[in-house]
Amino acid sequence: MRDDAVATFDFLVGFTIFIIAFIFVAAMIPHMLFSVQSSRIDYDAVAYRTGVILTEDPGMPASSTFPVWEQKAIPQDVIRMGLSVEPGSAHILSKGKVERFFNDTFFTYPDDYRRSLLFGDYPYSFNITLTMRNDPPVRSIGPAPPESYGAVRRVVVVKEPSLLFVSDSVPDHKKFRHEGNETPDQRFTVELPMIELLDRSVDPLFRIDPRTDPIRIEIGNFSYYLNSSATEARLHRVEITRDGVPITFPAYEIWLDGIQTTLPADISDSLNFTLNPVPEPPWGSDHMIGITFIFQNNPPASLMTGTHIYDYRNATFPDPGQGILEVAVW
């Protein structure tokens, strides 16, 4: 009787050990097979998720005061990268975001991209390439992928900044021409009504937002506006105003006769001006932005004294760039 009890006890111990070992092996085998057979599926999923974030999400910085990550001066201030112009505008990419994203002197591959785009602790390798039909044709970060990798492709368009072009070929602009010599200093003001520009009914591909987009003004055939006795004029300074009050805002570029320059400077052929966005813009959605070009009367110049409105009736957009964004992960 005692021997039967010992045998039963030994059987229970052995059977318990067998069951535990069986459960352990059964739990391990699917994971081993999954890692061998489904790694490509995992990489495809990561590539797909990354492509969705890039093409459908505008991203975000560490500060919520003004959510534009591409204007941050420190890479660590970028919480999440995204190239879309705004939420809900899938496949419409911001040119400013694209240029900052592929700036390998600002971001460090792979650390900054893993932290702000791929997330997670797994050390994925990746390549992200934007191939455009126009210049520059190809932008890319990361090494070329190996033979086996996960990938996704998305068709995209890149929004180009708007332009206000003033020329003697446009009849409405001729009213700014003044005949006669020895006129006082001339001023030409361009006003940007934020309330009108930020109209949400405008397609995001063509919406003008001075808080995030460069504002470009070009005066062509400048000699048309000069007095007959003058061959050039001197641009003395540019004054930026908010609701008519001058403010300090140095974030702009001036090209005179095809050469980037500082003021004062002479001009005889063309003026190209770009107002650049900044991280904390000094104007809001209900302000009127004024850009005034002040020309000295030496030599005498009769320029287009007056005000022009930078709005959807006068500004134009270049054709958006068309391209393919490809994400490869391994």
Image (tube, helix red, strand yellow):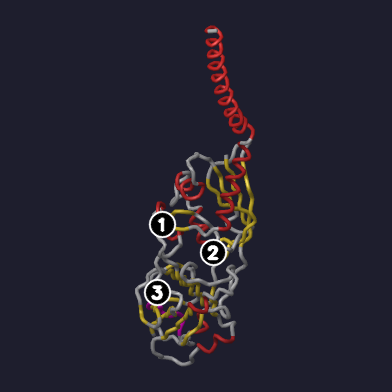
Instruction: Calculate the distance from the C-alpha at mark 1 to the C-alpha at mark 2.
Output: 17 Å
The image shows residue 289 at horizontal and vertical percentages of 44, 78
C-alpha distance separating marks 3 and 1: 40 Å
Q: Which residue is mark 2?
A: 86
Which residue is drawn at the image coordinates 39% and 54% (left, top)? 74
For marks 3 and 1, the one nearer the N-term is 1
What's the residue type where badge 2 is placed?
Glu
Verify whether residue 164 appears in magenta: no
Residue at point 46%, 69% (across, down): 211
Q: List the residue tagged with mark 3.
A: 265
Above or below 5: residue 63 = below
Of mark 2 and mark 3, the one earlier in the sequence is: 2
How many neighbours does mark 1 have within 10 angstroms: few (below 14), some (14-19), or many (20 or more)? some
Decide whether the magenta segment is chiefly helix, strand or loop: strand
Q: In this view of the protein, which residue sits in the foreground, 186 or 172?
A: 172
Mark 2 touches mark 3? (CB < 8 Å): no
What kind of residue is marked 1? Ala
Which one is in front in this view, the residue at disc 2 or the one at disc 3?
Answer: 2
Measuring from the top left, give residue 41's x and y in whole percent: 63, 40
Pinpoint residue 256: horizontal percent, then vertical percent: 46, 72
Question: Circle 1 sits on which residue?
Answer: 62
Q: Amino acid at mark 3?
A: Ala
Mark 1 and mark 2 lie on one chain; the one further toward the N terminus is: 1
Q: Which residues are magenta?
A: 230-237
Secondary element under disc 2, as helix, strand or loop, is loop
Compute the Cα span from label 2 to label 3. Answer: 39 Å
- Relative to 4, is 110 on the left or the right? left
Residue located at (59% from left, 63% from top) = 89
